[in-house]
Image (cartoon, rainbow, N blue to C red):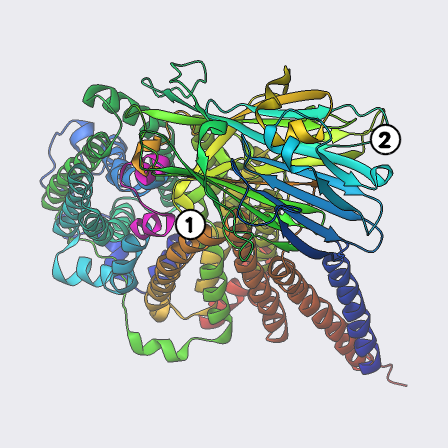
Amino acid sequence: MADFEERRSLLGDEDERFVGDREPQRGAGGTGGTGAMPAICDPRHLLHRVVVLVFMCFLGFGSYFCYDNPAALQTQVLQDLNLNTENFMRLYAWYSWPNVVLCFFGGFLLDRVFGIRFGTIIFSVFVCAGQIVFATGALLNHFWLMEAGRFIFGIGGESLAVAQNTYAVNWFKGKELNLVFGLQLSMARLGSTVNMNIMGWVYNKVAGLVGSPGYTALGGSLMIAAVTCLFSLICALVLAYLDKRAERILQKEQGGTGEVIKLTDVKDFPLTLWLIFIICVCYYVAIFPFIGLGQVFFIEKFNFSPAEARAVNSIVYIISAPASPILGFLVDKTGRNVVWVIIAVTATLAAHMMLAFTFWNPWIAMSLLGVSYSLLACALWPMVAFVVPEHQLGTAYGFMQSIQNLGLALIAMAAGAILDTRGYLVLEVFFCACICMALMAVVMLYFVDYLRGGDLNQSAAARARLQKEATSDAE
Amino acid sequence: MAAGTVKTRRTFLVIFLFFSLLFSSSGQSSFTRQLIVQLNPGWSAPAPPGGDLLHIRAVGDNDTLHFLFCSQGAPTLLLVHTNSSSSSVKVDWTPFLARNTTGSLRVEPESSVLSSTALVFSRVGDVHLKSAQTLNPHTQEVNLSLSLSQLLEYDDINDTASMTSDLFPPYELQNLSWSRMNSSDPFAPLCGSVVNSSGSICLQLSAFESEGRGQSWPRLLHTANSSQLGVWLDGVSPRAARSRFMLELQAVGGAYPLSRVDVHRSIDDEFTPSIFKASHWVSSANGSSEVVGFVRWRSVAFRRSKPALEDATPCRNSAPRPQSSEAAASGLIRAFYSNVETFGLNVSFGLAGEPFYNSTRFLSWTLLMGVGSPPVDSFSALVVAVMAVGLGAPVLVLLVGGVWICARKRAMEPTAAYEPIN
């Protein structure tokens, strides 16, 4: 994720302890104590770190796999539990509610309260327990239990992502870090894609075993999905062990997130940052709830089969996996983030309008959506680092995540209600309206930034030159 | 430069208004008719035996639509279009009640009749929509009559919703005893109770004075040239736990048979959420594709009387097939038409995987029948307004801002360049 990379490079010089701990030559223990260890067991050796990387990537797999279970099984959930769409979308809303508050405290909890290792295990347990409670609710046909399960799942899910990034920062540095973040993101997308395409088949098999489709079959499928969370929990335990072992061998301190959250910083946020927040909220509420409701939309409007509908729904994630590193590289090389954001928002608007007002093949629109979604993520999140001083970055990102989750929770329920009463056209028009608001915000951001000197929209070369001048001035 | 900005704004406002007017005027041209209702014309009280005849005259400026809704035999709706605003219906009741004489129901003057269509509801169970067209050699008549002839029920044990599954004996609608119509409330439902069951099948006719939209789902758009007929099954006991229902309709018409069903896909599902298809059973004039009469419905039925989105169940229809003169099951058809060319169609409710009839024991379906072309849905004002504002505002800000920035640059330019020293 480019945002963490930007954050780290700005924090790096300041936080000597943070950087220094990963350089065992400078550490207190030096090379003492390692002895003759096979390469795969040596925490400094690349091979060992690749093994750790594998576990790190699968740490988030279960959470991303299970997040979109409702979307992958939308028709079954609606029919077996007799829900209307508004209630169905509450499953997504309950995931987002705890993260409105938790985004501020995730870093704090990982650094001060639990420590990275124990914290990761705890959050993995929450993810696992949440999914099991969710599946149990389906088995017993109690919707409130399913909502509670999603709530518990939500407590663990987002914080686990923070933990995953912290592990990455602790074990990898420099150019490797970009690759690692890219891989983690790709694994997350892979989890979502596999979920979309496989859960329907799992459900049919379970329904065959149970005898007929119904909430028992649904509960069974969700329990099978919980196995991935169990797998992630095992990865968390293994990572904790390997991290502790590395700490003992290399005698370094437990890493931290390096985030400092101070809520009073909010009053210092500049106008450009608030505009970035608005773009973030208005944009993502037109993506995730849409994917949540996408399957039935493609079945009803475009006459797709359920399997086809799930496949086209997952194309956003499939494209995002390879596109994110490439587009991130592109944005890094050219700079001019605001222009890229404008392009991404306009492309998303075009995709939604295609889906709303035409019968053109939705593969086109969804592919466009996937590319523009990746582009926006690569261009928008680093902008925060350009407008906010380093010591406020943690607060800024925490706030951004928090209001994003608030927006998602509210809009998920609104989308369900709109669909129930007015249908898909009005729903798509609503999403177009959200994107138009994001477009308004980014156009205003362009002008505000232009009038204030154009810091956000500099080309990469100009920014690098300025940074060099700044550091040479400081010397 | 301020004047330039104002001009840009004004131009944009004009363009915006132009487009919004364009959108709003894309609807149907609206005209109104005056409705005059007669129950059992020419028959003095009490009510005639065997069923009632409801006659609604929808009088326009220079034409009249006669809606005749009759429960003698299978319930039938007959629509006659004349080119005079003073045409009337004459019934010879004795031969009409005997159901064996053509011409016992006439529209006078005969030469003014442009078209007529009749729809017969003959059977419940086996959905078999028959569209019958009668050939009247005297005039270019488009007779549109729709009859519900049969209600059929089949046991969908394997949940495949194939209409070839085991069919139970059909409910012949001509054999049901129908409720009496009331002149004070002519648009009240006509209900017939099904034998051996506490439930009933009901039909409700609505005629309209002007353009509008139905109040409850599927909220079909109607004009003064069309009438809406709602059909519902309420509480009829299914003969198996997994049975589904089918409805047989027959249409009898004049020179232009209701011979084909066009399926229209529309992007607009505002009024029937998640249903993007409408079916038009049309009769077209000889040689041209111009539609003369139609029966229109959305491919959805509802499983509850006040439905929510999850109560919608899709419905399918078979292709219209020419039929023998079985449409003679209706007293109105026999009275009005001489020789009958009938087309029949089945509408089946519920596809594989959908809940069975037994889950709610209620099914409602609505159709629209009229002359001319079927009305076409357009966007509601809300959608147009949201899109206009949503797209217009950023463009406006971009234009205004861009113009302002250019203005500023131009104003600042002279001071930016260095001036020569001497």
Q: Position of residue B180 (x, y in %)?
A: 48, 45
Range drawn in magenta: A73-91
Q: Position of residue A284 (x, y in %)?
A: 45, 54
Residue at the extreme right? B422
Is A77 magenta? The answer is yes
Chain identity of mark 1: A
Name the side, left or right, on which B238 lies relative to A105: right
Residue under the image location 61 percent in, 65 percent down: A443
Q: Estimate how packed mark 2 is, as few (under 14), some (14 to 19) or many (20 or more) residues with alpha carbons within 10 Å.
A: some
Q: Pointer 1: what residue? A: A289
Q: Pointer 2: what residue? A: B139
Residue under the image location 81 percent in, 51 percent down: B86
Image quadrant containing the N terminus of chain B: bottom right
Disc 1/disc 2 C-alpha distance (Å): 59 Å
Looking at the image, which is closer to me, B1 or B381?
A: B381
The residue under label 2 is which amino acid type? Thr
Name the side, left or right, on which B326 lies relative to A2: right
Residue under the image location 57 percent in, 63 percent down: A442
